[in-house]
Image: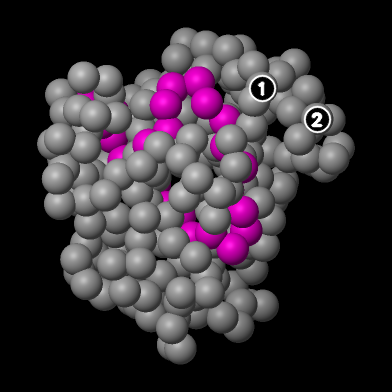
Amino acid sequence: MNRLEAIQAANEDVRILSVESPEFLRYGRVIRIDTEQMCRLVKENAIFPEEGHRYVTAFDAIDSCPAAEEYNNIITGQMDEQWGLCWGHNQKLNALEWHTCNEFNIGVTDLILLLAKRCEVEEGNRLDSAKVAAFYLPEGVMIEVYSDTLHFAPISLDAEGFACVVGLQRGTNEPVDQELKKDPYLRARNKWLIAHNDNQALLDKGAMPGIYGVNIEIRPIN
């Protein structure tokens, strides 16, 4: 039994597909490129939190490495991309966010992504969690997630946690000017977010509710 089959067997109540499946093409695409350098640098430099997850917009070990320059030239049309990192522990949907630019992800570990489409968001920024799809991203694989795809923190497959490289246009997810802010769903620069109605921790931090239905949870396999 491979890793995808194992996670499917442990989560029979959730349909989990591979990013290599045709269904993923609605949300993004797989990029065939060497990711060894970034994955190695993350593994050598990232210290995992004991609980919860962290995100930095530009992770020092990878943001200026030769691979970052190569990716900027090859896949972003020479845009100034920031290469950040999301890593730690997470098992639930909890929220969804979106940007006005596409996002590039590299699975430094095997992980699960929970995704939805902006066209499925109802009036009032409400979304039925039944519209959310689960995809398996194997270690070492890079994907491009389209700007109209909602996403949030990846899901861990084992107790060691997950690590995911995050490439975005520089400045995305940095603090927003509160005096200029007009949209209550704007949580950071170029980042809009809706929280699951049951995620009290995020709501207490000022996030706007909107996702209803089951707060999807993926059970780890180790």
In screen coordinates, is 62 left or right of 110?
Answer: right
Which one is nearer the viewer's eye here, 64 or 25? 25
Quarter of the image with the C terminus in it: top left
Range covered by the magenta-colored residues: 136-161
Note whether 54 is above or below 95 in the view shown: above
Q: Position of residue 21 (x, y in %)?
A: 46, 40
Alpha-carbon distance for marks 1 and 2? 10 Å
Q: Which residue sits furthest bottom?
A: 123
Q: How is the image coloured?
A: one colour
Element at label 2: helix
The amino acid marked with disc number 2 is Ile
Residue at point 46%, 74% (across, down): 120
Element at label 1: loop
Note whether 182 is above or below 44 in the view shown: below
Q: Position of residue 64 (x, y in %)?
A: 72, 23
Q: Is residue 182 magenta?
A: no
Note whether 161 is above or below 61 in the view shown: below
Which residue, given by chain and number where applicable, does mark 2 sit on?
74
Which one is nearer the viewer's eye here, 10 or 64? 10
> In this view of the protein, can residue 76 be seen by the observer?
yes
Residue at point 66%, 22% (across, down): 33
The amino acid marked with disc number 1 is Ile
Which residue, given by chain and number where applicable, does mark 1 sit on?
33
Which one is nearer the viewer's eye here, 161 or 118? 118
Which one is nearer the viewer's eye here, 171 or 40? 40
Q: Position of residue 112 (x, y in %)?
A: 35, 39
Quarter of the image with the N terminus in it: top left
Q: How many marks?
A: 2
Which numbered tag is attached to residue 86? Answer: none
In screen coordinates, is 8 left or right of 149?
Answer: left
Q: Position of residue 216 (x, y in %)?
A: 23, 56
